Amino acid sequence: MFDKEELIEATGAKILKDNGIEKDFSISTDTRTITSNDIYLPIKGQSFDGEKFIENAIDKGAKAYFTSQNKVYEGADLVLQVEDTKEAYLKIAQYYREKINPVVIGVTGSSGKTTTKEMVYAVLNYKFRTHKTFSNHNNEIGFCQTVLSMAEDTQMLIVEMGMRGLGEIDLITTHLKPDYAIVTNCGSAHVGRLGSLDNIAIAKCEIANGLNQNGTFIALNQDITKKHLKFGGERIFYSVNDVEILEKKPSYTKFEYNGFEYELNVEGDYNIENSLSAINVGLKVGMSPEDIAQGLKTYRPIEKRWEVENIKGFRFINDSYNANPESMMASVKAFVELYPNPVVVLGNMAELGDEEKKLHADVGIYLSKFDKNVKYLLIGNLAAEIGKVLENSGFSVKYFDDNKQAAVYIVENLDKSNTIFLKASRAMQLEEILEIIKK
C-alpha cells in the first residue's frame, strides 16, 4: 500500500488533479479486478494500451490513476502524470523492494530457472519468511507483480528473470538490485533470436549488472559464462563433478557435496546442479547444511516439469513445459537410465535459428549412445531429425504429424509396463496426448 506522497517520490510523477484524497493505494493494472482502494496504472504493450481503459477503471470505482497523457477524467480524485507508465511500474516495485529490504535472489538461465527458483525457495522457506515469483511470470511485468505482492515481513525474495533478447534481464536486475544472482546455465535456447551462444551468455550475465557489489554471483561452471561475466565480487561456480552421487532411483537422488549429504525427490544430474545453487545460497545466508538438506527434501516438481501421472494404466512423466537441446539431452538421459521399458516422446524445439535441423540431429547423436531398447516417438518435422539419427543407429522409431496420432499409437500399441516420457517446446503442447488418452 502506498500513499500519494510515496507514489510521487517513487515515480517522479506530476500532479494533474488532487482533490485532497488521503488514503493508501494498492497498484492495479487490470480494470477487471480494480476496486476503490486501487490506483490504476495503465500498461502499454506492442498490441495493448491500458490508457484506453482509464474511464472503465473509474466506472469500476477507482478514484485515482496514472497517465502519460494530459487528459483528466471526471470521477477521479487523484491523477498522476508520468512519462512512461511501465517505467513507473518498475520504479514503484523498486521503491517497495527497498522499503521492505529483504535479502534478494535473482535467478536466470537458458533452462532450469523455474526449477532452481523452486529449489531455492524450498531451502530458504525452511527457515525464513520467503516470497517468490509465481509460476514462470518472469518478464518485467511479472517482476513488478512479484515484488508488489510480497508481505511486509518478507525476509527473502526470489525473482526469476526470463529473456527473449538483449537488455531484458538488465532492465529487471537494475530495478531489483539482487544480493545473490544465479545463472543456471547458458545454452542454445533462443539462439534463433539472439544469433549466437555468445549473445545468449551476454544476455544471461546481464543479471550481474544490478548485483550488489558485496553480493555473490553463483553459476554453473561454464567457460562461456566466465568469458562474458563482468562482476568483480565473489563468484561461486559449481557442477555435478563437484559431488559424489550416492544413490539414484526414480524420483530420488542422494549425493554428497562438500562433506554433507543431500537428498532430492527428483532424478537427473541436471537437477543435482540446480540444487547446488540453492545449497550455496542457503550457506551464504547462514543456514546450516542440516537445515538446507531438510529444506531440499520439501521440493516437488511443478506442473509439466517431471510430473508423474498414471492414465488408463499407462505411466507418464510429463516434462513438456519447454525444451532446448541441452535440457532435452539431460532429461532423456536421466529418464532412460532409471526407468524400465522406456518410451520417449519428443517434439519440435523452437527458436533455434538457421541451425535448427542440425541442433535436433545433435540431440539424436547424443541419445544414440544410450540403451538401444528405448522406443522413440517423434512428433513434428524437426523432431524427425532426431529420429533419423536414432533410426540409423538401430533404435525403434515412429513418426507422427500431431499429438492425436501419437496418442492413438500409444493406446493401441504400447504395453502398460512401459513408462512414457514427454519432452518438447511449449508450442507443441504435448500434454494434449495425456488429455486425449484420458478421454
Image (tube, rainbow, N blue to C red):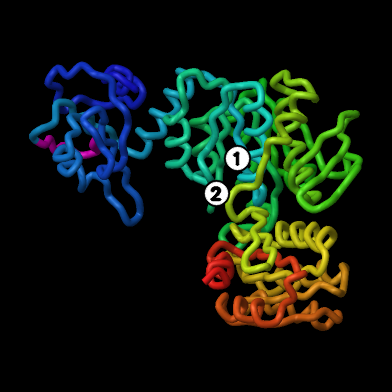
**Crowd around label 1: few <14 · some 14–19 · many ≥20 (10 Å):** many
Q: Which secondary structure dominates the residues rendered in magenta? A: loop
Span shown in magenta: 66-73
| Residue 166 at x, y percent in the picture | 55, 49
| Residue 342 at x, y percent in the picture | 78, 68
**Residue 69 magenta-highlighted:** yes
Q: Which disc is residue 163 wearing?
A: 2
Q: Quadrant of residue 358?
A: bottom right
User: What's under tag 2, amino acid-wise?
Assistant: Met
Q: Secondary structure at mark 1?
A: helix
| Residue 408 at x, y percent in the picture | 60, 80
Tell me the residue that label 1 is attached to. Answer: 206
**Crowd around label 2: few <14 · some 14–19 · many ≥20 (10 Å):** many
Closer-to-camera residue (75/14): 75
Residue 128 shows up from this direction: yes
Q: Is residue 404 left or right of residue 200?
A: left
Q: Residue at x 80, y 77 (%)?
A: 390
User: Which residue in the rendered view is the most extreme toward the left?
Assistant: 74
Above or below — where is 219 with respect to 391? above
User: What's under tag 1, amino acid-wise?
Assistant: Glu
Closer-to-camera residue (27/435): 435
